[in-house]
Image (cartoon, rainbow, N blue to C red):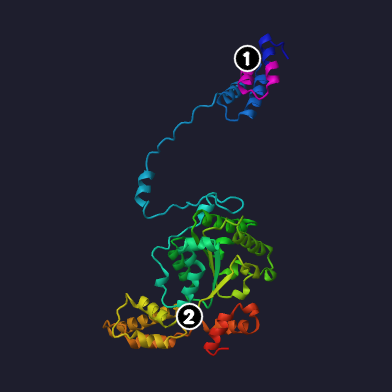
Amino acid sequence: MPDDSPLIQSLRTAVAAAPADVPLRLHLAQLLLEADRSDEAVAEAAVALQHAPGDAHARDLMARAMDAPPPSAPQPPRKRAGFDWKAAEEQVGDAVPPRFTETPVRADGQDDSEGADAWDVEDPGTVRLADVGGMQEVKDRLDAAFLAPLRNPELRKLYGKSLRGGLLLYGPPGCGKTFIARAVAGELGAAFLSVSVNDVLDMWIGNSERNMHEVFETARRQAPCVVFLDELDALGAKRGRTGHSGMRNVVNQLLSELDGIDSAANEGVFVLAATNVPWDVDNALRRPGRLDRTILVLPPDGPAREAILRYHLRDRPIENVGLGKLVKITEGLSGADLAHVCEVAAERALLDSVRTGTVRMIGMKDLLAAANEVVPSAEPWFASARNVAMFANEGGMYDDLVTYLKKRRKL
C-alpha cells in the first residue's frame, strides 16, 4: 500500500472513529481516487453504499473508481411511431374494464385497507316497529327490553338501567327476524351493523377473532349502534360439539366482546341475534348480561299477514281481491311464503296473458290457487322444535314455544 498523505491518514482515522459517517467516507474515497488508488476508493464507496444504498454521490464515485461511465439520468421513453395506444385506450375505456384493480393481499390473507372502516354501518332510515305488521307481543317485549329505558333517561338513571343489552330472536325461517332488528335500530335512532358468518370467519389463524373484535370496536365508536348477529348458531355454536379449535376461539372472542372490556365498554351497543335453532347456540352466550333475553318470532298473525300481502301486491295489477279471505286461508304461512304466494299468482296471470294474447289483471282466483300450492315452510321447523319443547326445556327456556304448540294442538 502506498504511503498515505497526512490528509488521507487523518481522514482514515476520522472514518474509523465514525464508520457510519457517509459524507466523510466519500470524501476519503474521492481523495483515494484522485491519488490513483481506485481499488481502495471502490472499497470505501462500497461501505458507504451499505450505509446509504440510494446515495447518488456514492454510486457516481463507485462507477468512476471502477472505470465505468457515471449513471446517466433516466430518459423519458420515446414515443413509438405508428399505432396510437392512448387513443385506442380512450375509445375502449368504457367497454373494457380494468383487468387488475384489487389491492394486493398480504401474506396473512388480509387486505392492507381492511380494519374497522371495512365494516359497513347502515342507517336504518325510517323503518320503525310500526312498519312491522301485527306481532304486538313481540313489539311489547322489545319495548320493555330496549326502547322504554332509552325513552326515559331519568327513570333509567333512578333504577340503574344501563344502555346495554342483548336479545336473541328465534323461530322458523322467513318470519321477519332481520326486519324486526332493523326496526329496533330505527326506533333507537341507532346505526345498524349486520354481521353474518361469512363476514367473520377467515381461513387464516387469528383473523376470525380479529374480525369479531373489529365488529364490536366499530359499534362502540358508532354508538348508539345495533349489532345484528345473523345465524347465531353458526357464529356461536356449542363449543363441545365443535371439532375445530378455530370455531371455539371465535365463540370465546364473541363472549369476550359481549362482556366488554369494562362495565361501560358496551354502553350504547345493543346486540340482537337471530337463529332458527337456539338449542344449538352455546349456553354461555345466553348467560345473564349477554344474550339473556329471548323472543320467539312466529309466523305472522292475521294483521301481519294482511300487511305483508298488501305490501307485495301494491305495485301489481290486481282487481277484486279480498284480503280478508286471503288472510284466513294463509294461516301458518311465513312472511317469505306470503311473498311467494303473490309471486306465483302474478306468474299465473302472466302466463295466461301470454297464452290468450290478452293482458289481464291478477284476480282472487290466482291468489287462492297460489295459496293452495304453497306448502308452509315452517312445518319442518316445528317438527324439530316440538322435540326440544317436550324433552329439552330446561329452566323454562322455551315456554313460549310450548304455549304456542299447545295452542295450535301440535304438542
| Badge 2 density bin: few <14, some 14–19, many ≥20, Cα 10 Å | many
Q: Whole-percent x and y of residue 226?
A: 50, 62
Residue 124 found in image quarter = bottom left
Nearer the observer, 162 or 305: 162
Given the current orientation, which residue lies at the most extreme top position?
6
Residue 192 visible at all: no
Nearer the observer, 363 or 82: 363
Nearer the observer, 373 or 151: 151
* Residue type at numbered disc 1: Leu
Label 1 belongs to which residue?
Answer: 31
Image quadrant in which the C terminus is located: bottom right
Label 2 belongs to which residue?
Answer: 299
Given the current orientation, which residue lies at the most extreme bottom position?
409
Tell me the residue at 40%/67% (across/down): 127
Q: Whole-percent x and y of residue 334?
A: 46, 80
Q: Is residue 78 above or below residue 114?
A: above
Q: Is residue 33 above or below residue 59?
A: above
Range drawn in magenta: 12-30
Under circle 1, the secondary element is helix
Tell me the residue at 45%/80% (across/down): 300
* Residue type at numbered disc 2: Pro
Q: Is residue 16 magenta?
A: yes
Residue 136 visible at all: yes
